[in-house]
Amino acid sequence: MDEIEQIKRDCLHKILTLYKKANAGHIGSSLSCLDLLIYTFFRRLLEGDKFILSKGHAALAMYVVLAKAGFFPESELETYYQEGTLLAAHPPCSGKLNGVVFGTGSLGHGLSLATGLAFSNKFTGRKFTTYCILSDGDCNEGSTWEAALFAGQHKLNNLVVMMDNNGLQGFGKSEDVINLEPVKEKWEAFNFEVVVAEHGNDFSSIDQAFRSLDKNSDKPKMIIARTVKGSGVSYMENKMEWHYLPMSDEQYLTAINEIQG
Amino acid sequence: MRREFSNAIEKIARENKELIFLTGDLGFMALENVRDAIGPRFVNAGVSEQNIISMAAAMATEGLLPLCYSIAPFIVFRPAEQIRLDVCLHGLNVKIVGNGGGYGYGIMGATHHAIEDIAVLSSFQNMKCFIPLCNEDVEAALSAMFEYQGPSYFRLGFGVLPASMELPAFRHTRKLKDGNDLTIVGMGPVLLNAIQLSGKTDFPFSADIFAISEMPFPDLSDELKQSIRKTSRVLVIEEHVKRGGMGEHLASHLLENNITCSYKQLYATGYQNGLYGSQSYHQSLSGLDPAIIATTIKQILYGK
């Protein structure tokens, strides 16, 4: 796991630096799912596999991981938030950024898109796996559950969904806004094979969850990752405001010092 | 047009193995032939229009040719954001077919009508809307839609072409009749309410009649320009609201081409009395029935 931990440190540093340079928000959202992204791209994704980030507001984490994984040059990251960039706050709809099949940003689209990709294999004969990361807010959207019903009905076992279950959403705690619990049972009731990663910002917990999936199951897969919004920067952790706020100079230095240990 | 549609699409789907027919749980006594012909490529995805559109977008990226079918308002308005983002912004070759355009579902009520569909969809990036004139037009209109490799909407209605008329080859703008007094421009089967007036009014008139079958249409055809310059009088007929409809689009083309004329529009006015009835009832309330169209023509020509 040393190598992947080093990748995480590099990505964290890059993400914080780019957020600071752009004076942009959604930091907490990116840090919440960074481990899932790194694990997906460096431990799971095979040639031809697809990935959909349904929580498009965590785009920067995805951009940085994509660049790190070689999907496009790291120099491209320097255009983040600049005029005329492909790397906006949410992933582009142009199809021009390698690794980004669909632009997202409005919640509730990702699982349907991923389901469509997974379903297409039945007609094309292709064999890829489709991965998708959902947020808690995504699971407020009715369209997410439409897709879940369809994926279960059609036994799309080539669909692997991860829920970045940090318990915070746009304007409150999930339990106060729309309580998703019992979330494991919900996904099971929708005919998914469900495993919980109790520490969704810990690679060994994520790895254990993936390994415990039944390879022979004909159901779509759901990893519920119990994550922490703002994970890795102590003053951001579990704080809703880090969905929105940019960092001050002092906060940036504190964050960088912290991740460099 | 539903029968003509199912027959034509069965043929297209048999020939094109990439076509995947996604229905939102509709098609009873209408699409069984398609289902039987293409087997697993006919997918009843349930009553889930948002999911259907996004899935279709994803399937299109894999080289498939998805067609999404439901009652027009259900497949347009509920998943409008999915159409806007996942299909149109990505420029994907997804075909959307809505049955019952305009007041087509009559007494089923406003939930089942689509009188704002063209306004919404024709404003989206890359989207082309195809509006066949009559049942006999469906096969050619479908071919035109499939020739366009991009986001498309097909508005199914109902209307029978008079036996005496010949239908010109499908184009976005077609001249159906020759005349001298005014230029009638219509979209969809409601135009047949004007066509049937020929020789049946208590006043003499002859009109150039044009059908618009694609929205937004890219330009004014020379024939239409010449007609309007000749008559200087335009009557627009559409079973669609005024805002964002064919009439507004035509008016903008006329302005851009410095063509001046008198301009009268007949269009779907909605539900001002709050009451429901057949398609004819709603056409009548909107002034789209043959009698009111005749009165309107008389007013345009004779001022009374």
Image (cartoon, rainbow, N blue to C red):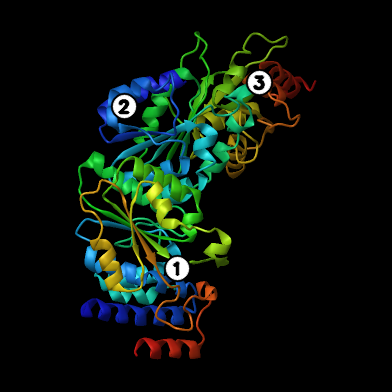
Pinpoint the chain carrying mark 1. A
Tell me if I can see residue B216 in this picture.
no
Give the quadrant of residue A38.
bottom left
Foreground: B261 or A34? A34
Pinpoint the chain carrying mark 2. B
A65 relative to A213, above or below: below
Three-letter residue code for mark 1: Asn
Pinpoint the chain carrying mark 3. B
Foreground: B180 or B236? B236
- What residue appears at the point 25 percent right and 44 percent down from the top-left corner? A121
| Residue with the mark numbered 1 | A166
The secondary structure type at the circle numbered 2 is helix
Q: Are marks 3 and 2 in contact (CB under 8 Å)?
A: no
- Numbered tag placed on residue B181 in the rendering: 3
B269 relative to A191, above or below: above
B24 relative to A192, above or below: above
Tag nearer the camera, 3 or 1: 1
- Which image quarter is the C terminus of chain A in? bottom left
| Residue with the mark numbered 2 | B12
Give the crowd class for mark 2: few <14, some 14-19, many >=20 residues within 10 Å. Answer: some
Q: Going by the image, does B291 lie left or right of B28?
A: right
Foreground: B302 or B101? B101
Give the quadrant of residue B14.
top left
> Residue B235 in the image: x percent, y percent?
65, 27
- Label 3, label 2: how many angstroms apart (C-alpha)? 42 Å
Foreground: B20 or B242? B20
> Residue A11 in the image: x percent, y percent?
32, 78
